[in-house]
Image (cartoon, rainbow, N blue to C red):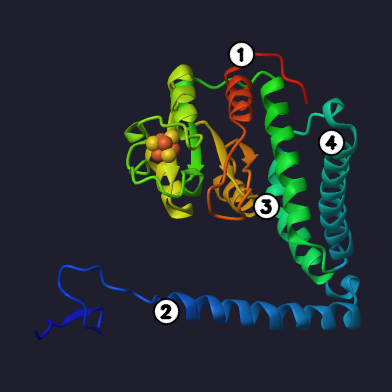
Amino acid sequence: MARKRSSIKGEEWTGSEESVPYTPYRGTFLLLLGVCALGVVAAGFLLWYVPTKGLGNIHPALPYVIGAIVLGVGVFILSGALVIALAIVRGKDITPSSRCRGLLVKVFLPIMVLVGGLLKIPRIKIEKAFVDLNNRMVRAMIRKGRRFSPEKILILMPHCIQWDDCKIKVTKDVKNCVGCGRCEIAELVSLSEEYSVKLFVLTGGTVARRRLYEFRPDAVVAVACERDLTSGVQDAYPLPVLAVVNKRPRGYCMDTGVEVQEIRRALEDLLGGRAIAA
Ligand code: SF4
């Protein structure tokens, strides 16, 4: 059967009328490519020009202006790194601010992953440390008085936690689970009802983002492997996420599990129902 042709901004598209057209956004990509290329060339030029000519010869005030900027950025980054390092070493004695969490998530983590890759440090080591530190920072926020109401908390579970042979579709609605007990979903459904929080079993990161967009929670308890938790915490920032690493007796992505008591602890922490031990 001959398919109808549609035109999208002058480009030929041969999909059916009902399907969503694929738009490659070549213009945006080319624009960014041009900006990046010019940025690299301009940075190279400045690296040559400034030492050759001297800041003072460009403008008498420039050495002081640039010096103040470099000093300010340096002090901010070093003090942030120091607070994070102390949080790692001394745990509960340090309460990093939410700005420190932003610095860790948005600045240090991508650089550490890059440098770790160059130094051949296994990425999972960085991710494990990051997940632990993120949780301590979120708990520190709670210790400082931040509280969340149950209707603004989401529990997000990966689909692989479901027993592999279970035919029930819990990704649509967790309440479809009949509670046979072959996987932790039955217990998690009871837990979500006990604390009146929403629970979702997700098929991937895109669905997770959609749930966050739909429900606009104030806090999330997320279960996944270290890699997915790390990227999820980055994507969700500044949303506080208590991340729980899954159990993987059969390896990644199949019949995984979770320590349900850890989910209970995370919920009680967010709801302020217990003393929080760092
Ligand atoms: S507990 Fe629920 S989801 Fe898990 S295997 Fe049984 S019916 Fe399926």
Q: Looking at the image, is mark 2 or mark 1 earlier in the sequence?
A: 2
Query: Which label number is shown at residue 273?
Result: 1
| SS assignment at label 2 | helix
Q: Residue 235, image x and y in percent?
A: 56, 50
Alpha carbons under labels 2 and 4: distance apart: 45 Å
Instruction: Please provide percent x and percent y for residue 241.
Output: 60, 37
Do the CB atoms of the residues marked 4 and 1 lie less than 8 Å apart? no
Labels 2, 4: front one:
4
Q: CA distance from mark 4 to mark 1?
A: 24 Å
Residue 171 occupies which quadrant of the picture? top left
Q: Say which amino acid is labelled 1.
A: Gly
User: Which quadrant would the C terminus be assigned to in this image?
Assistant: top right
Whether the residues at callouts 3 and 1 have beta carbons within 8 Å, the answer is: no
Residue 223 horizontal side relative to residue 72, left or right: left
* Residue at x-position 48% and y-position 21%: 150
Q: How many residues crowd around disc 4 within 10 Å: few (fewer than 14), some, or many (20 or more)? A: some
Q: Which mark is residue 27?
A: 2
| Spatial separation of the CA atoms under disc 2 and disc 3 | 27 Å
Q: Is residue 58 above or below residue 251?
A: below
Q: Which residue is mark 3?
A: 106
Residue 156, placed above or below residue 72: above
The answer for how far apart the CA atoms under marks 4 and 3 are is 18 Å
Closer to the camera, 254 or 6? 254
Q: Is residue 103 visible?
A: no
Q: Earlier in the sequence, mark 3 or mark 1?
A: 3
